Amino acid sequence: MSEIMTKSPFTGGPVEEVFDTEKMTFRGEDYIVHSRYYKCLDTGEIFTVSEQDDATLNDLYSQYRIKHGIPFPDEIKAIRTRYGLNYAQIGKLLGFGVNQWAKYESGQVPSDSNGRLIAALRSKEVTLKLLNEIRDLYEQSEFQKVYTLIVSSRDEDPLASQDSIFYLGTERSINNGFGEFNHRKVEEMVKFLVSEKTFPTKLNKKMFYADFLHFKRHGKSISGLRYQAIHYGPVPVHFSTIYDHVPGLICQSFFVGGHEASLLSTTEKADASVFSEAELETLKEINAKLDSFSTQEVIDLSHSEDAWLNNYPNMGIIPFTEAYKISL
């Protein structure tokens, strides 16, 4: 659950949340990260809660991972599960300690050398080569079991195959909020935000606010999509193609005043199990706040955001650094 403070722990009086940037050093390198903290309006003292600290560290670690080519925790897990290996089996393959791989999946940032080793396992050919190089470390039965699991795994890299022609530009960066891209999660997010019948323009804004609000609070977007500033406000890049390929999503067209309009609805209930508790909380909040808005009211709200104002002149991609100034 989000930790939203309304009273000062020092005086019981009012507080305000402050958004700022600061320089942090990680492994000898300096990074500019976004930070959040509360300020007691009675005393001026500042303090943080765990959610704020986690978001700041997510920003720091995400920048480091991208700079050094180190996989993110969900990517590390996807590599292991692709081959059907447990922590001990894949750790032994790379010479890691007993619990090291599990720690990496839980968020610990690997060293640069370990990060490169992990990334190399995205190649099935490389993984089998590594296994054969250390086969003397295995009992024959153990070796055969691991070998069979790897050989029988799917040939394609699941992290690369997600990047289909419909989802271009989903590599992790500040332009997609360092988010895990997963086409299934995008589909379920769309279905979750289509409340009964929704105009595509309004859905675009709900997607934008959900991703940017989540990044603002947690240092990571939900969908891993990029957003562009166009005339009617922020929209997911290639949004029409994305919506065309969401299972169960129906588009009904009609004419109003000589102009064609569309309404979206879904025949399938969103599968909430693909979201974390925090992601689900964000999506529910966006529906609660924006469902009562008309499409024009949501457009007007998005036009008041610096995220749109600063990027609309060039119809540019909206970096998630703009999330810290959104009004929701």
Image (cartoon, helix red, strand yellow):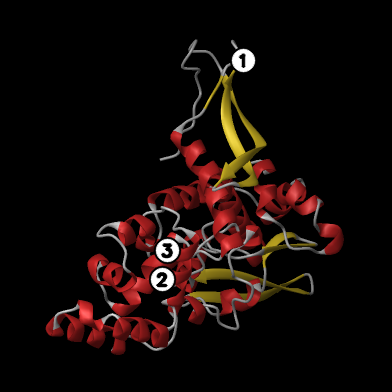
119 vs 256, left or right, is left
Eye-nearest disc, 3 or 2: 3
| The image quarter in which residue 314 lies | bottom right
Mark 1 Cα-neighbour bin, 10 Å: few <14, some 14–19, many ≥20: few
Q: Give the alpha-carbon distance from disc 3 to disc 2, as whole Å.
A: 27 Å
**Above or below, 303 relative to 21:** below
Q: Residue at x 43, y 72 (%)?
A: 267
Label whose residue precedes the other's in the sequence (3 or 2) = 3
From the viewer's perspective, tell me whether residue 152 is left or right of residue 257.
Answer: left
Q: Is residue 226 visible?
A: yes
Estimate the spatial distance between the alpha carbons at disc 1 and disc 3, rounded to whole Å. 39 Å
Determine which residue is flagged by label 1.
44
Q: Position of residue 37 (x, y in %)?
A: 57, 30
Relative to residue 272, is residue 148 depicted above or below?
below
Contact (CB < 8 A) between labels 3 and 2?
Answer: no
The three-letter code of the residue at mark 2 reads: Glu
Q: Quadrant of the C terminus?
A: top right
Q: Earlier in the sequence, mark 1 or mark 2?
A: 1
Residue 58: assigned label: none
Judged from this view, the residue extending furthest toward the right is 313
- Identify the residue at horizontal 14%, vertical 80% (top origin): 139
Q: State the residue position of label 2.
A: 268
Secondary structure of the residue carrying tag 3 is helix
Q: Is residue 195 visible?
A: no
Q: Residues within 10 Å of mark 3 (few under 14, many from 20)?
A: some
Q: Quadrant of residue 121?
A: bottom left
The three-letter amino acid code for the residue at tag 1 is Gly
For the residue pair 34 and 324, the one nearer the viewer reads as 34
Indicate which label's residue lies in the foreground, 1 or 2: 1
Which residue in the structure is indicated by mark 3?
74
Q: Report the side of 313 relative to 285 (left or right).
A: right
